[in-house]
């Protein structure tokens, strides 16, 4: 087989190299890894064909079938899971403009100079396709009926409610509901009954399929097709009839769940990197809000987006940052950054008048922008480290990052009037993306090649002599592994037991402060007027209300927050990935792995058959794979543990949310508040917080049982396969020595690159 030429010097330090040369070298680095992946897939294809051609389907044994299925799964498996980067910000923060600049296509997603544009969650990734494609996913008929019923109930007014209603916070709640109904059913739709609207013919033809597919050869063409579906509509648009097809498409926005866009392979976005434009607060619709939460929780990286005029005085980005930190604690997130947009928006005269460091000369807008950027970074980095430091160990990787805050200008990236392209920091964000990609690609490609090496080793050394089998049975290896799994189970129990005292303290704190949380979220100093629609929405949604225009209210989360305040530092230490201590879960797994591998090595070395020692590599690599897979599953499952507190509280309060949501007539707001206050008080005294604590402990128990059972099953399967007696096999397996050598060469090259 031919091998691509190795490019020397690519992996040395490139700090001293010109920016354009750095760009070239980074591209070469990515191509090197892509070439390696391509090579390994070719080798696996050849190995699979050899194996398939040598087997008779009628007589294939279970063990050979396992080998064949593993090879098939491996050759079709991606070496890199999607890397989700969430652009998490409130409407109008400039997420779409930022994304357009990153992919170097100025008007790909809709942008506007003076208002919010994107009306739903948009996901963008690159592929090997030559076309630009979009899938517009719609709510199902049942999902829309559920929302329609709630919207009508939310807008229903009695004479008494009209008398007590005044403008205020409810104006946003009502406005969003009215816009949705008018978009689909026209003027005065908000005054019609649920049954009447169900019978009514919508003003737009609703597709029978749950997914609308768009395709184009050019970015501009797809952008034009996509624009009507994702652009926010004004009140005037909703009131006017849909005069043409384009207007009709605009009316579909209340039914759109999310939009998935695929662009051709690009140097700007590495393959497997998926951008998610995530609205700041979720959505009133239960399905969309659930998707909002899931999207944040599966992000590998979260960028909190806030424009420069709001970031110093505003609080919205602080709320989003808090949500991001929760995802870092409980989800897949391994990195957070604050991206401050519109850094070019600066009135020079006003800035010069207000700046404090007047002894330093600033002569033009260029210098002023850069000075303000540096000031913003300093303040925000300090604030972020304080927030993160409350819940994370002091040596956590994210706390020691140099760049936690980026100040960017998409406008200046294109026009270069006041600052350069480099100073717009768009290229710096691209560098950030490539570094994440390369880091993950290196790590997971090594894992992928290791798995390939392991499975080919198994094929090469599948059968044993009777002497070998007798030796392994006498060695006590299986019993040793069983004992180590029992020891691991005790270590995991000790590890999780660290949460017992913080949980107890959290329960005490929650019981003493739940009335404060209730008052802060659901009582208004100005009285009950102007808030009853908002409160009804909170009750309809079981304590969690989110809209595109109103700050998120999560009563269950607020009630659970004192418990989180107590457990967060310990939880973060238990599930930390980097620099684990003996109090963390990962070192427990590492100690188990090392002891099992050491015992396997000892048994193999004492084997009476010299050729049997080639099994050692298989045992070692397969054990590594089993532990890595287990660690990835733990990372996915820890969210269920972390989210169990508010979910338990929500379950306890659900009947009272439903009761309060039915309230109509005079003083409806006060009556809803009374129902919730009285029953939260009752449930708190009856052990609601203790129940939430037990729910979290039960989730930890289930996680421990999963880890123990998985390791026991996987290692037992590995030993049985590796120790198959040759008389059990009816097939003659092919010689895969050449394939093994090829994979080993790629493996060694990867190890050299990781060390350099």
Image (cartoon, grey):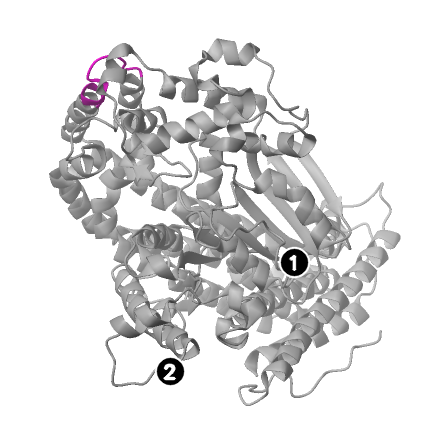
Q: Residues within 10 Å of mark 2 (few under 14, many from 20)?
A: few
Say which element carries label 2.
loop
Q: Is residue 128 left or right of residue 551?
A: right
Left or right: where 263 falls relative to 630: right
Residue drawn at 65 percent across, 27 percent down: 243
Whether residue 181 sits left or right of residue 547 in the image: it is right
At horizontal 20% and vertical 46% (from top left) the residue drawn is: 562
Q: Position of residue 23 (x, y in %)?
A: 63, 77
* Residue marked by disc 1: 722
Secondary structure under tag 1 reads: helix
- Measured from the top left, where is residue 602 in percent x and y? 53, 71
Residue 507, visible in the rendered structure: yes
Q: Which residue is mark 2?
A: 363
Q: CA distance from mark 2 to mark 1?
A: 74 Å
User: Where's residue 680, x and y in %?
Assistant: 19, 28
Residue 670 within the segment the image draws in magenta: yes
Is 579 drawn above or below residue 509 in the view shown?
A: below
351 sits to left or right of 435: left
Q: Is residue 536 magenta?
A: no
Nearest the eye: 213 or 568: 213
Point 75% across, 69% down: residue: 740
109 over 236 or under it: above or below = below
Viewer-nearest of discs 2 and 1: 2
Mark 1 closeness class: few <14, some 14–19, many ≥20 residues within 10 Å: many
Residue 630 in view here: no
User: Between residues 229 and 58, which one lies in front from this camera angle?
Assistant: 229
Query: Which region is colored magenta?
Result: 662-672
Residue 217 lies, in percent from the top left, at 78, 51
Quadrant hosting residue 509: top left
Residue occupying the point 15% across, 23% down: 678
């Amino acid at each position: 087989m031919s091998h691509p030429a190795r490019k020397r010097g690519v992996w040395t330090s490139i700090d001293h190299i010109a920016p354009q040369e750095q760009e070239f070298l980074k591209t070469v680095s990515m191509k090197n890894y892509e070439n390696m992946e391509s090579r390994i897939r070719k080798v696996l294809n050849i190995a699979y064909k050899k194996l398939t051609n040598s087997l008779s389907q009628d007589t294939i044994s279970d063990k050979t079938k396992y080998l064949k299925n593993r090879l098939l799964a491996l050759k079709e498996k991606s070496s890199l899971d999607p890397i989700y980067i969430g652009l998490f910000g409130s409407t109008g923060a400039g997420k779409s403009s930022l994304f357009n600049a990153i992919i170097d296509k100025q008007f790909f997603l809709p942008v506007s100079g003076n208002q919010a544009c994107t009306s739903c969650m948009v996901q963008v990734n690159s592929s090997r396709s030559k076309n630009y494609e979009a899938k517009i996913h719609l709510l199902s008929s049942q999902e829309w009926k559920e929302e329609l019923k709630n919207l009508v109930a939310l807008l229903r007014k009695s004479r008494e409610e009209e008398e007590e209603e005044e403008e205020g916070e409810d104006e946003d709640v009502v406005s969003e509901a009215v816009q949705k109904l008018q978009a689909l059913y026209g003027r005065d739709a908000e005054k019609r009954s649920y049954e009447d609207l169900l019978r009514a013919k919508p003003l737009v033809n609703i597709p029978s399929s749950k997914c609308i597919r768009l395709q184009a050869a050019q970015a501009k063409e797809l952008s034009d097709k996509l624009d009507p579906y994702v652009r926010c509509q004004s009140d005037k648009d909703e009131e006017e009839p849909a005069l043409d097809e384009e207007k009709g498409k605009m009316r579909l926005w209340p039914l759109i769940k999310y939009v998935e866009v695929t662009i051709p392979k690009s140097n700007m976005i590495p393959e497997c990197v998926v951008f998610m434009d995530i609205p700041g607060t979720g959505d009133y619709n239960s399905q969309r809000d659930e998707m909002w939460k899931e999207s944040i929780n599966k992000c590998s990286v979260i960028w909190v987006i806030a424009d420069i005029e709001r970031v110093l005085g505003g609080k919205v980005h602080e709320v989003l940052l808090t949500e991001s930190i929760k995802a870092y604690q409980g989800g897949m997130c391994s990195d957070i950054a604050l991206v401050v947009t519109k850094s070019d928006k600066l009135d020079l005269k006003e800035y010069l008048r207000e700046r404090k460091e007047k002894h330093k000369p600033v002569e033009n807008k260029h210098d002023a922008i850069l000075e303000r950027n540096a000031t913003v970074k300093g303040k925000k980095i300090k604030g972020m480290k304080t927030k993160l430091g409350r819940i994370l160990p002091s040596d956590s990787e994210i706390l020691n990052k140099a760049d936690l805050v980026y100040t960017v200008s998409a406008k200046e990236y294109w026009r270069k009037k006041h600052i350069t392209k480099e100073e717009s920091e768009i290229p710096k964000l691209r560098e950030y993306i490539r570094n994440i990609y390369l880091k993950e690609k290196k790590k997971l490609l090594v894992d992928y090649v290791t798995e390939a090496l392991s499975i080919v080793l198994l094929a090469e050394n599948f059968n044993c002599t009777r002497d070998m089998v007798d030796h392994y049975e006498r060695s006590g290896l299986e019993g040793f592994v069983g004992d180590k799994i029992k020891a691991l189970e005790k270590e995991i129990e000790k590890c999780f037991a660290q949460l017992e005292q913080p949980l107890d303290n959290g329960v005490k704190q929650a019981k003493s402060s739940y009335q404060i949380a209730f008052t802060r979220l659901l009582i208004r100093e100005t009285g009950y007027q102007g808030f009853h629609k908002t409160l009804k929405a909170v009750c309809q949604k079981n304590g969690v209300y989110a809209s595109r225009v109103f700050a998120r209210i999560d009563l269950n989360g607020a009630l659970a927050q004192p418990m989180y305040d107590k457990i967060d530092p310990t939880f973060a230490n238990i599930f930390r990935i980097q620099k684990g201590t003996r109090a963390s879960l990962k070192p427990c797994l590492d100690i188990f792995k090392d002891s099992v591998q050491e015992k396997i090595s000892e048994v193999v070395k004492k084997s009476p058959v010299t050729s049997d020692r080639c099994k050692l590599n298989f045992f070692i690599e397969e054990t590594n794979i089993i532990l890595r897979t287990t660690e990835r599953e733990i990372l996915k499952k820890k969210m269920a543990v972390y989210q169990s507190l508010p979910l338990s509280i929500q379950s306890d309060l659900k009947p009272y949310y439903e009761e309060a949501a039915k309230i109509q007539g005079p003083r409806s707001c006060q009556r809803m508040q009374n129902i919730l206050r009285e029953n939260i008080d009752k449930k708190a005294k009856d052990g609601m917080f203790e129940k939430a604590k037990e729910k979290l402990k039960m989730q930890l128990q289930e996680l421990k049982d999963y880890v123990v059972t998985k390791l026991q099953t996987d290692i037992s399967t590995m030993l049985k396969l590796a120790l198959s007696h040759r008389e059990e096999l009816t097939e003659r397996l092919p010689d895969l020595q050449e394939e093994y050598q090829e994979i080993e060469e790629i493996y060694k090259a990867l190890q050299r690159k990781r060390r350099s």
